[in-house]
Image (cartoon, rainbow, N blue to C red):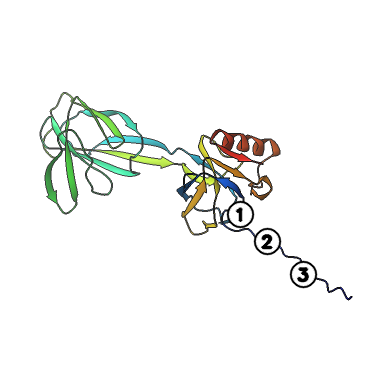
Amino acid sequence: MTYTPQTPLRETRHPGGFLVSQANGHLSIDEILVNGGHGRLQPGTILASAATTYAGTGAAGEDNTGNGTIGAIAITAPAIAGTYTVTLISDTEFTVTNPNGEPVPARGGTVEFPDDDGVVVGPGTVGEVFNSEGVGFLITAGSTAFVEGDTFTVAVTAAGGGWAPLASSTSGATGYGILYGVADTTNGPAPAAAVVRQAEVNLAELVWDASLTAAQQDAGLASLKTQGVIAR
């Protein structure tokens, strides 16, 4: 009998190939958006999600008549990065427009539709905290009263946050997951699916960022375990 050598069969990475078991239906998997700039990510890549950090800076309009101030600025999700505009409609009332020119709901609902530049909503009241859609501030009257048309701006910045491969530089992670299929982030954020709960996975099939030490990998596995994702 003649033996004919066979070419070894090598299995390539494929969606979900790292899974040993998972919960019924799609309970183990969430849809996510992976941040851009990480190239082509393979199934089994360990991911971490971090909360976005926000900051806001208020400024009075250069042509204001009133000399009141804006302060106590507090920005949280789901605020939009960009410049919010506060417009006085009397000496004590104002309206707010977000960076997209869309409504920022407040206690009284929509008060006017001034022009094509965007819908202005409110109302807000001088001397009372405004807090809506993640944007909070307090406008305080000065010695000279406001007049209609006086303005303030609130410049909002957002940094970090979102899903990305777990790396040695990762900080403030709020959740962990395992990339289910390929995600190409070369040209920007990429929609994807991730295993985030109630699953068993093959440890040998997981993909780690090269910056992680063995101890950091162990910490990542421990964090996944708290979510019910067990690597064996």
Q: Reading the chain from its start, which is encountered first: label 2 or label 1? A: 2
In the image, what residue type sits under mark 3?
Thr
Residue for point 55% across, 53% down: 38
Q: Which residue is mark 1?
A: 17
Task: Give the spatial CA distance, label 2 vs label 1.
Answer: 10 Å
Which residue occupies 83% across, 71% down?
5
Task: Name which residue lies at 68% across and 35% down.
Answer: 215
- In the picture shown, does residue 193 fall above or below 74? below
Secondary structure under tag 2 reads loop
Image spot of residue 100 (x, y percent): 27, 49
Quarter holding the C terminus is: top right
Mark found first going from the N terminus, 3 or 1: 3
Residue 65 appears in the picture as rendered: no
Residue bearing the label numbered 2: 11
Q: Is residue 124 above or below residue 81?
A: above
Most extreme residue toward the bottom is: 2
Tell me the SS state at disc 3: loop
Question: Which residue bears the numbered disc 3?
Answer: 7
Residue 13 at x, y percent in the picture: 63, 58
Contact, CB < 8 Å: mark 2 with mark 3? no
Q: Which amino acid, by three-letter code, is at mark 1?
A: Gly
Contact check, label 2 and label 1, Cβ < 8 Å? yes
Q: Quadrant of the N terminus?
A: bottom right
User: Toward the viewer: 73 or 144?
Assistant: 73
